[in-house]
Image (cartoon, coloured by chain):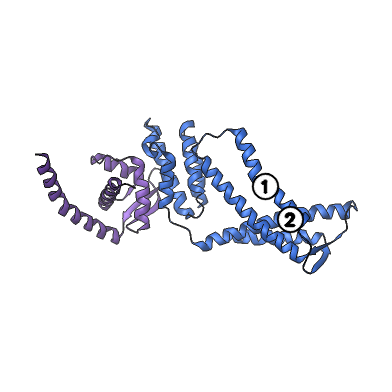
């Protein structure tokens, strides 16, 4: 699989500027149809690239390959690609959640350990209410999936379109940054503490982070 | 999907099977062969069809290193593909003459 992607990366450099733009839009659009078989996806992408390179060498236009409506062409391709098994998708989903938790736990664990042991700024022991924590993790994962999905949809939407960079920055910053950030803070401040409380030294958070990282890695290897 | 393109798609699928049954080809080669036969299709339209034919297991595609270097995906017919081509050929023969005749009568 990775060899197909590498071959694609190399060959893509031979495209001229115009062809590269349309091909990369095509590629991003097709690759982002994430419930499709990766092998078939990369194979057809390479076929299209080879074909486009021949057209370019013959001085012909990409229109002859993709037609006047490249977005529709990309949709046609995606529509014919075989689906991946749902099992794969669930694995990818769990992998994403594990990575997210590991990054979050590793960074907070590290910062809190440094603050409490290095600078005596924080209590070295920290208490968590299990009920509240569980809700934050579930809602947080759900929200991240929604944000992730919206990012996918947004990038797909922006393929084959000219989008103003400033507008893009404002819109994406709002949707993908400010909205989820606010929800997270709201959860932290307004969720009442409930469920049994556990107390442990802050560096355990880092250890838990490493465990999630390992699970994520393991899933990635298998995928 | 309008009817015209449905009909054309079906015919084009049959033609693709016919080309592949003669020899193993890769995508660009297939487009050239179809054009040489005077079948004037947009080159890109073969790729969605190739994907569909693979999904229906009528053809089998395999990435292979070609003689001069780059990896190419070569297609060949499966037994199911050969059966499908045979059916297409029979259907086409059965339809061609009566349709021609009907249209000729209308013209004159």
Quarter holding the C terminus of chain A?
Answer: bottom right
Helix, strand or loop at disc 2?
helix
Horizontal side of A174 relative to A27 (left or right) equals right
Q: Residue at x 34, y 54 (%)?
A: B53
Residue B7: x, y in percent? 27, 49
* Residue nearer the viewer, A97 or A168: A168
Extreme residue in the top direction: A59
Residue A58 horizontal side relative to residue A38, left or right = left
Alpha-carbon span between mark 2 and mark 1: 13 Å
Q: For residue A165, which quarter of the picture?
A: top right
Looking at this view, is A139 or A156 the one in front? A139
Chain A: give its colour. Answer: blue
Q: Nearer the viewer, residue B105 or A77?
A: B105
The dot on residue A42 is none
Q: Is residue A30 left or right of residue B17?
A: right
Q: The chain shown in purple is which?
A: B
**Residue that label 2 marks:** A187
Image point 76% across, 61% down: which residue? A207
Q: Are marks 2 and 1 on the same chain?
A: yes
């Amino acid at each position: 699989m990775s060899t197909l992607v590498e071959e694609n990366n190399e060959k893509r450099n031979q495209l001229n500027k115009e062809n590269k733009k349309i091909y990369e839009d095509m590629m991003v659009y097709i690759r982002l149809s994430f419930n499709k078989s990766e092998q078939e996806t990369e194979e057809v992408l390479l076929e299209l690239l080879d074909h486009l390179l021949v057209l370019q060498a013959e001085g012909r236009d990409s229109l002859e390959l993709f037609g006047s409506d490249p977005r529709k062409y990309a949709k046609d391709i995606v529509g014919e690609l075989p689906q991946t098994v749902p099992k794969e998708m669930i694995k990818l989903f769990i992998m994403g959640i594990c990575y997210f938790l590991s990054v979050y736990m590793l960074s907070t664990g590290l910062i809190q350990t440094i603050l409490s042991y290095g600078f005596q700024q924080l209590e070295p022991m920290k208490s968590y209410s299990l009920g509240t924590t569980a809700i934050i993790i579930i809602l947080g994962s759900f929200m991240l999936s929604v944000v992730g999905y919206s990012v996918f949809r947004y990038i797909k939407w922006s393929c084959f379109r000219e989008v103003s960079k400033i507008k893009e920055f404002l819109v994406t910053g709002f949707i993908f940054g400010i909205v989820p950030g606010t929800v997270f803070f709201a959860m932290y401040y307004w969720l009442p503490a409930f469920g049994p409380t556990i107390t442990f030294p802050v560096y355990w958070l880092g250890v838990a982070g490493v465990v999630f990282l390992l699970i994520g890695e393991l899933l990635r290897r298998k995928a | 999907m309008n009817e015209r393109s449905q009909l054309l798609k079906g015919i084009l699928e049959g033609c693709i099977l016919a080309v592949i049954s003669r020899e193993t080809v890769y995508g660009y080669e297939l487009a050239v062969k179809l054009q040489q036969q005077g079948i004037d299709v947009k080159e890109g339209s073969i790729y969605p069809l190739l994907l569909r034919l693979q999904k229906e297991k009528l053809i089998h595609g395999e990435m292979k290193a070609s003689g001069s270097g780059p990896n190419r995906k070569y297609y060949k017919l499966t037994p199911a593909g050969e059966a499908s081509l045979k059916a297409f050929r029979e259907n086409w023969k059965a339809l061609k003459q009566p349709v021609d005749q009907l249209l000729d009568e209308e013209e004159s």
